[in-house]
Image: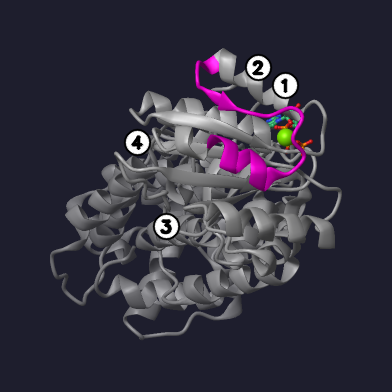
Amino acid sequence: MLERLGNKLKDIFNKIAGAIFIDKKLIDEIARELQRTLIEADVDTKIVFSLTEKIKKEAAKDIGGIEKREQLIKLLNDEIIKLLGKEKYELQLEKKKLNKIMFLGLYGSGKTTTIAKLAQYYTKRGYKSCMLGLDVHRPAAPDQLEQLGKKISVPVFINKQEKNPGKIWKEFEQKIKDYELCFIDTAGRDVLDYSLIKEIKEITDTIKPTYIILVMTADIGQAARKQVEGFKSACPVSGVIITRMDGTAKAGGALVACSETSSPVLFIGTGEHITDIESFSPTSFVSRLLGMGDLQALLEKVKSATESKGKEEKKSEFTLLDFAEEIDKMQNVGPLNKIAELIPGIGGKMPPGLLDIQQDKIKKWRHAIKSMTPDEIQNPEIIKETRITRIAKGAGVNAGDVKDLLNQFKLVKGVAGKRQIPDMEQLQKGNISGLGLSQKQLRKLAKKFKGKMF
Ligand SMILES: Nc1nc2c(ncn2[C@@H]2O[C@H](COP(=O)(O)OP(=O)(O)OP(=O)(O)O)[C@@H](O)[C@H]2O)c(=O)[nH]1
Ligand SMILES: [Mg+2]
């Protein structure tokens, strides 16, 4: 089901939104999860791997902090949209003129139902519409169309005896000229075989449709590619409608396959009811799938927090004050569970784990810094063991937390000032301090400390 795909993608976005540091490990993890999710949605593995490679490559540029997170969320969002075709296509329909729209597709793909859905959709939008039944093979087809027409109060042209579609067209041609839209139903087949191609070609030559639309069910997944290519080789297909989006995990694969074959998805069918049809836009489809109506708000929040604090030039000397400011900046973005709250459906329920520990740690560090004297903040080197205990007491934290803070600061400052490259022992200390930074990350972060950290 689409809901499952949406939930999985939401988890991935949530992971990025919640991470304090966007490092290689996280990016690899995100890429792996995205692969699993898309393959489960039946997206062609080649496409999946080339997408995740691209994301890894883009995300690896300039490993940093908050802008990175924003960048990664945007990147992922944009790439998924691109995968689905990026642009929104619409049928260009002229008013006060007959537009003939013919529907093709295999058996049971949803042609007849979709025609009725669209006839109602466009009637509501002010188009004078009618339906023409040219499915001369299935005996019940004209009745089905007739009943649907009654239901939506749209005129239906059928001839239950005639077995030649061309003749049926000729019979009603003059009457149909009074309409702006004529939705033409055709017969399905088990497979796209010679007889179906022949029939399609004959009808096309006689009627000269304004648009030919292929109807496919979402559950064919990536096989949509082969089907659309087959139909396109028989006649000029203007666009595609994917039905039964409501009942399959493979919908993603079908949509991507259409995009890959440059076959615009015009509408999607989302249920059996006559109103269960939606015009398709990759952008709004993805934001709805993610349930991230507020993705923009999330990005804005991250952005403003970064910009407001990051603009002024800093001196090259890095003090505990700078460190405090960076921690502050981090807090400006969050509380991280507030960010998650912006994502509907998650409602502030952040997954427990490392993230909470990190945030907790930062909180303690902020308290510790507040308990220091201005001198100590400027020159943390003067802080001796006895002061550590008192600072900790004053801040309501453990002495170990204050030590972690000082170690982390010393380590980063050392690298930032290029006075010393931390050795493994120091780095390991840095690691247990709760941020979990690798040596490479620390160096990169430290470099940034000279200007701004995140
Ligand atoms: N759940 C769901 N069912 C759909 C959707 N679109 C069509 N159906 C159902 O699919 C079945 C087949 O639909 P039809 O419109 O008769 O399909 P068709 O392509 O005209 O079939 P043939 O004329 O036999 O080739 C019907 O039971 C429809 O109610 C959809 O978007 N979602
Ligand atoms: Mg039909």
Dot 1 and dot 4 residues touching (CB under 8 Å):
no
Dot 2 and dot 1 residues touching (CB under 8 Å):
yes
Residue hosting label 3? 87
Q: Quadrant of residue 8?
A: top right
Q: Please, what is the three-letter code of the amino acid marked with disc 3?
A: Glu
Q: Please, what is the three-letter code of the amino acid marked with disc 4?
A: Gly
Residue hosting label 4? 394
Q: CA distance from mark 3 to mark 2?
A: 36 Å
Q: CA distance from mark 2 to mark 1?
A: 6 Å
**Where does ligand 2 appear, by image quarter?**
top right
Badge 3 density bin: few <14, some 14–19, many ≥20, Cα 10 Å: some
Mark earlier in primary sequence (3, 4):
3
Answer left or right for 427 relative to 446. Answer: right
Residue hosting label 1? 143
Residue segment shown in magenta: 152-172
Which numbered marker is on residue 235? none
Which residue sits at x=65%, y=57%? Answer: 34
Residue hosting label 2? 147
Mark earlier in primary sequence (2, 4):
2
Mark 2: is the Cβ under 8 angstroms from ligand 1?
Answer: no
